[in-house]
Each structure stands twice: as C-alpha cells, then as structure tokens.
Image (cartoon, helix red, strand yellow):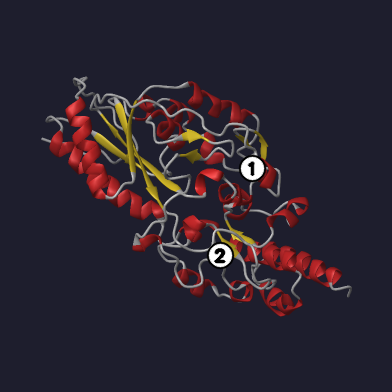
Amino acid sequence: MVLHVNHESSTMNAPLLTPSRHLADTLRGRALAIGFDLVGFARALPTPRSESFSQWLAAGHAGTMDYLKRNVEKRLDPRRLEPWARSLVSVAVNYDAPAPRSLENHPSDCGWLSRYAWGDDYHETVKKRLHQLADAIHELGPEGTLTRVCVDTAPVLDRVWASQAGIGWFGKNTCILNRSHGSFLFLGEVVTSLDLPPDTPETDHCGTCTACIDACPTGAIVKPYVLDGRRCISYLTIELRGPVPEELRPGMGQHVFGCDICQDVCPWNRKSPRTERPEYQPRPGNVSPSLSGLLEMSREDYRARFRHSAVKRARYEGLLRNAAVAAGNSGNPSLLPALEKAAAVDPLVAEHAEWAARRIRARAGQ
C-alpha cells in the first residue's frame, strides 16, 4: 500500500532505501515534464545555512512574523518535520511574465504590484504540480514510499533546500539565483523517505556586485546576504498588519503589494527567460492598478477581484493602507477625493490616508 502523507506531522518510520541514480534521473525527467523549470535533490539533514536562520531570528529581522518563530527545530531539520524524511526534491517554476520590469515612466495615479502577484496564486498552482510529482514518486519508488508536499506555508526553509539541491545560490538580496533562469522563481519541495543521491550545491556567482544593496530604497539589505525584514517593502506591504513606520513610508514609493527592485536590478535577471504559462500572465489591472480604484474598492469588490490571487495575503485593510501610502508618495492631487473616501474604512486606513493627504498638499504648496 502506498501512503501519501499531507498532514502536519507523522510519527511513522520508513526504512532507509538504497540510493538510486537511475531513479533520481527518472524523477528529474518527470518533474520537468510536469512543468517545473528546475529540479534538484538534497539530503534531509541540517546545514550551516539553515543554522543562520536562528541567528536571523535572534537579530529581530523577522519583525512581526511570529509564525517564523514557531517550529524552528522543524525548519532546521526536515527529520523533525517528518521522522522518515531522507531526501528533499526541490523544484522551481519561472514566473517572470513578459511585462514591464520596472517603475520607470510609471503614471503617478497608479500603484505597482510585485510580479509574483500578477497572475494566479502560486500556492495553488505550484502545489498542484507538486502533488503530481508526489504521485510520480509513489509510482516509481518502492512500496511503502512516503512523501509530503511543501509550498511556502509549511515549516520548511525553501531557499536553503533549493540551494542545497543545486537550484541556485543565495544572492546578496537573499533570493535564490540561477545562472540561466535568474531569480523570479517559485520554490517548493517534496519531502520523501527515498534516499536519493544529492545534487551538488551551486557556488556563489554574485562576485563584487552590490546592485541590489544599492538600489533598495528602504535600506533593507543591511549587508550582503542579510535582509532586515522589518525594512523590506514586501514585508511592509504584505506581512505587517499595523501602521507602517512613518520614516519608511516615502521609501515605499508607489508599491501597493510586494517589491521587485532588488531583483529588477540584478544582472542575472537581464537575460533570464520569460514564462508563457497562462496562470502567471498579468490579470487585467494587476501590474499597475489605479490607486483611486483601489482606494474606492469595496470589500466585496476586493474579494471578487483578487480571488485565487496572492494579493489576498495583504488583506483588504492592508491593501487600502498601502494604496494610501502610494497615493501620498505620488504627489497627485487628483487622488485626494479617493483618500477621503478610504479614510472611512477603518482607523488604520484613515491614519495613512490623512498622512498621504498632508504629503500631497505639502508638495503642492497648499
């Protein structure tokens, strides 16, 4: 009987199976056929890179992301996540859709969404493919093979295992970089009881480049390979539930959900391929949405517009808060009526809308 494990944890034990290069090569081929762009294998063992996660937490760089502080031992050692874990099959999917890569010549009455949120929610699309890969593992592996699918929300350090599996290396902006595919990659894993021969970790190819560090408008990359999440625009617009620190608001520019600046300036992304997958192509209005449209959007409109979208992560009030900050940074007086309307949503939005209105009027000399 084949057992496919998808629950939070398991106490089942599985025998250590003999490594098989042929099986690994076959699985790699299956993964590529399923639709993954990159695939690699890693041992389910702690690494020096995973240990740095504890140091990052201790420095306070996680901010209010308390969920990262839970199940730390499972994040550091996959065998704590699943006692039968022997290997991780790490995969990556390119989501770089063919649309503008930067905010250059951007209209002042529009916001900006991170590229990963232009299309469908990757949690759903990548997980679907990972389940197909898990099915292939059960088909090709010996009887009794166990698996667990992980996409972002599981207590697994995706980038650590992608690095160990040779998918890419940690860039100075802490994204995983691949020489042929750049860094616009969704990551995921299948944890398995199979003892698969590991791939060689990729070496660092950032060299002396500091483009990502120099370009970050909030100074979130405090030094090479160290990101202070509390200053990152992605954190401020997605993870942070309360007010955005006022001193960081100007640096957010017109971003309303996430940020790609440190990736846009990376030389490894200059020639990386664009994806043609329909699920990652921009939905109407999702690249540079109208700020007045966001500020005047009802809760019902929000739910309908961002159904099956990663933008839901910011929540309704958070997205309006972000749109208010973007409006304030735009300096566009035409957005004042929309800001006044948004201020009636709740106190959090109101505080940011009032800040934005003051900023617009000050820049206009009113």
240 lies left or right of 362: left
Q: Secondary structure at mark 2?
A: helix
- Quarter of the view holding residue 333: bottom right
Which residue extends farthest front? Answer: 271
Q: On the rendered structure, is 115 left or right of 15?
A: right
Nearer-N-terminus badge (1/2): 1
Q: Label 1 sits on what residue type? A: Ala
Q: CA distance from mark 1 to mark 2?
A: 33 Å
Query: Does residue 347 appear anywhere in the picture?
Result: no
The percent coordinates of residue 314 (x first, y second) are 55, 58
Q: Nearer the viewer, residue 315 or 365?
A: 365
Instruction: Give the residue type that dot 2 points to.
Output: Tyr
Q: Is residue 206 above or below residue 252?
A: above
Tag 2 residue: 316
Q: Position of residue 29 (x, y in %)?
A: 22, 40
Q: Is residue 184 above or below residue 340?
A: above
Label 1 SS: helix
Q: Nearer the viewer, residue 85 or 351?
A: 85
> How many numbered markers are drawn?
2
Residue at the (60%, 30%) spot, across then down = 56
Q: Quadrant of residue 243?
A: bottom right
Labelled disc at residue 122: none
The answer, for residue 114, to whether it is visible in the render is yes
Judged by depth in the image, the label closer to the viewer, 1 or 2, is: 1
> Quadrant location of the C terminus?
bottom right
Find residue 196 and report its horizontal and vertical position in percent.
25, 26
Q: Measured along the vertical axis of the image, is residue 285 above or below residue 235?
A: below
Dot 2 surroundings within 10 Å: few (below 14), some, or many (20 or more)? many
